[in-house]
Structure formats: structure tokens, C-alpha cells
Image (cartoon, rainbow, N blue to C red):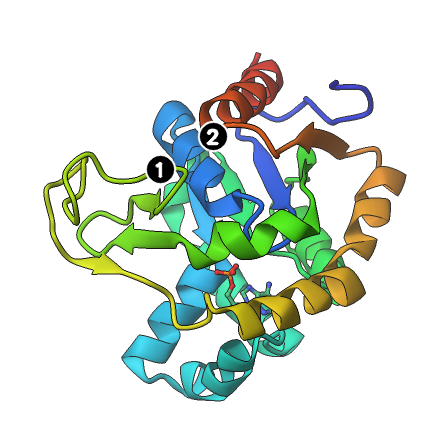
Amino acid sequence: MMDGADMSQSAPVLILLGPPGAGKGTQARMLQEAHGLVQLSTGDLLRAAVAAGTAAGKQAKAVMEAGGLVSDEIVISILRDRLAEPDGTAGVILDGFPRTTVQAKALDALLEDSGQRIDAAISLEVDDGAMVERISGRFTCGGCGEGYHDSFKPTTIACTCDHCGSQDMKRRADDNAATVAQRLAAYHEQTAPLIEYYQDQGALLRVPAMGVIDDIAAALDAIVSDIKA
Ligand code: AMP
């Protein structure tokens, strides 16, 4: 599975690719806990910017609600600022970035500037048809960020987080059927070409991701352990 992936760095830089609902956020969070990698989610950073009412957040809000992609300029700027923070020294896992070829090239340049490069771009391989159900059932704990799903990963006690006990559960405004269709379209038009981009770089790894969360996590865990070895 590791053919072609770069295993030379001590602090791994990983990318999770896949359509909305593929499980990028869930798996990034599990890798963060298991390996001390820092999850960098441009979706989370943009939602925080929207909530804080920053200039970037104000520009991004309507685009996100419509299921489109926020401009490369805004997203690259937010990601650049986040990468400059000191907590990523044990390695980072990029969740939801890059989403366009312009972003991928910007990331290559940013990493090159700091003497780093991508160890692996992991494509979570899923069937589009199942993504609407996956997305429309999901919710997140507002206390600790743990993700849940009505069918696939319910809380043990109704409306109570298994991890932190909070009862503040949140559903995303863009997790509705109409917006999901638009987000899937944006993925196929603008993000799917990155699979070939990373294949050409020799960094692409494909992981089947239609199974249960723990099996997919085990496959990713093995990849990260290989990279760190
Ligand atoms: P996510 O949380 O990754 O599903 O992202 C939620 C929304 O934020 C997306 O539908 C886009 O509108 C926006 N977004 C997140 N990351 C990016 C990115 N790398 N490029 C453009 N838009 C993004």
C-alpha cells in the first residue's frame, strides 16, 4: 500500500481526500488522538471565521451555505496562517484542503518554504449515493467536537456526548439534501482531479471507506505507523 509514498520526514504531512461524507473529519480526529497529529480542517477554520464575523467569514458565509467552494485566495490565506502556528511539529493531517489544483500548488509551495513535503495523500474511496444519508444523519458535540451519526454512530445516552457528557449537540446548516448535492458536484468538478495530481507526485494512497469507522481507522493507522517508522 505504501508504494510511491514519501516516508522520509519525521513529522508527517498527510492529506485526506474524498467527497463530503467520506469520513475525513472523523478519521482525521481519530488520527489526531492516536498519533498526536494536528487536524487542520479548512471547513472548521471557515466556520470559526463565519461565527467570529471576520471579513473572510463574511465573504465565505453565502458560498458555504450554497454548497460552493470558497475562493482560493481566502482559503489559502486562512490555511497559511494556521500552518504558521507552532503546534504542528508532530505532524499535520489536512482535512478538506486542498480542494482545487490552485490550492494544491499553493500547499506544495508553502511546504517547500519550510523544508517539508507531503508524505501521503489518502483518498477515501466511497460511493456517492451513500453520502447523502451519511451527511444528513450526522451531528457533532458542541462541547468537545466529537462526531456522531443517527444510524452509524449514535450516542450511548440520547443527546449526551459519550466523551464529555455535554448535551449541546449541533447539526451543520449545510448538511441538508439540496446543499449536499451541490457540494458533491463541487467535489467532482474541482477536487477529484487532485487524485491524479497526487498520483503523478507518487503520493496517492487509496483506502476503501464504505465499511465501518473502526476498520477504516485501522487502515489509516497502519499507513501513519508505516510513515512514522
Ligand atoms: P467541510 O467542513 O470540509 O465539509 O467544508 C464546509 C464548506 O467550507 C465547504 O462546502 C466549502 O464551502 C468550504 N470549504 C472548506 N474547505 C474549503 C477549501 N479547501 N476550499 C474551498 N472551500 C472550502
- Residue ID for mark 1: 153
Please tell me whether residue 219 is drawn above or below residue 182 in the rendered image: above
Residue farthest along the right direction in this orientation: 200
Quadrant where the N terminus is found in the figure:
top right
* Residue in front for this viewpoint, 54 or 69: 69
* Residue in front for this viewpoint, 71 or 69: 69
The amino acid beneath tag 1 is: Lys
Mark 2 residue's CB less than 8 Å from ligand 1: no
Count of numbered circles on the image: 2
Mark 2 to mark 1 CA distance (whole Å): 9 Å
| Residues at circles 2 and 1 in contact by the CB criterion of under 8 Å | yes
Residue 100, horizontal then vertical, whole percent? 73, 63
Q: Tell me which numbered mark, 2 or 1, is placed earlier along the sequence.
A: 1
**What residue lies at 56% left-to-right and 31% top-to-bottom?**
12
Residue 164, horizontal then vertical, whole percent? 13, 40
The amino acid beneath tag 2 is: Ile
Question: Is 214 left, or right, of 70 in this rendering?
Answer: left
**What residue lies at 52% left-to-right and 21% top-to-bottom?**
215
